[in-house]
Image (cartoon, rainbow, N blue to C red):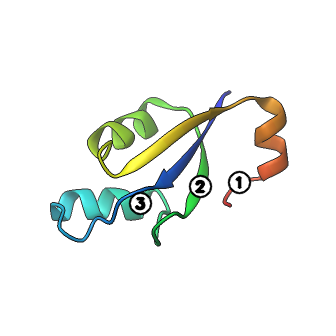
């Protein structure tokens, strides 16, 4: 399955509490932190909800193996 690298690009401080919890549940704690997650419908839904706070890039098999999960 494909993987996605999700990076917290903007601070969720002034966002809705729901968005702050969504960002936290994806494992993003600090600004410019990144995580690599499986490309599933639930993850896509979380990304859609906070698309104004994160940046997303798709990883191919080679990039995903190098990162090994959280960055």
Are there few (<14), some (14-19), or many (20+) residues within 10 Å of tag 3? few
Are there few (<14), some (14-19), or many (20+) residues within 10 Å of tag 1? some
Question: Disc number at residue 25?
Answer: 3
Q: In this view, does 63 lie above or below 23?
A: above
Tag 2 secondary structure: strand
Tell me residue 44's x, y (percent): 42, 34
Q: Residue at x 84, y 47 (%)?
A: 66
Residue linked to disc 2: 35
Q: Residue at x 50, y 40 (%)?
A: 56
Q: In this view, does 46 lie to the left or right of 2?
A: left
Are there few (<14), some (14-19), or many (20+) residues within 10 Å of tag 2? some
Q: In this view, does 19 lie to the left or right of 55?
A: left
Tell me residue 36's x, y (percent): 63, 49
Residue linked to disc 1: 69
Q: CB atoms at circles 2 and 3 under 8 Å apart?
A: no
Q: Residue at x 57, y 36 (%)?
A: 57
Q: Earlier in the sequence, mark 2 or mark 3?
A: 3
Q: CB atoms at circles 1 and 2 under 8 Å apart?
A: yes
Q: Is residue 62 above or below residue 21?
A: above
Tag 1 secondary structure: loop
Tell me residue 25's x, y (percent): 41, 60
Residue 21 falls in image quadrant:
bottom left
Q: In this view, does 11 lie to the left or right of 5?
A: left
Tell me residue 40's x, y (percent): 51, 32
Task: Compute the Cα span from label 1 to label 3.
Answer: 15 Å
Q: Earlier in the sequence, mark 1 or mark 2?
A: 2
Q: Is residue 48 above or below residue 13?
A: above
């Amino acid at each position: 399955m494909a993987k996605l690298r999700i990076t917290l690009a903007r601070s969720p401080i002034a966002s809705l509490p729901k968005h702050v919890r969504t960002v936290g549940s994806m494992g993003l704690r600090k600004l410019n932190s990144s995580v690599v997650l499986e490309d599933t419908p639930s993850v896509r839904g979380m990304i859609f909800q906070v698309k104004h706070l994160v940046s997303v890039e798709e990883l191919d098999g080679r990039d995903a193996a190098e990162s090994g999960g959280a960055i």
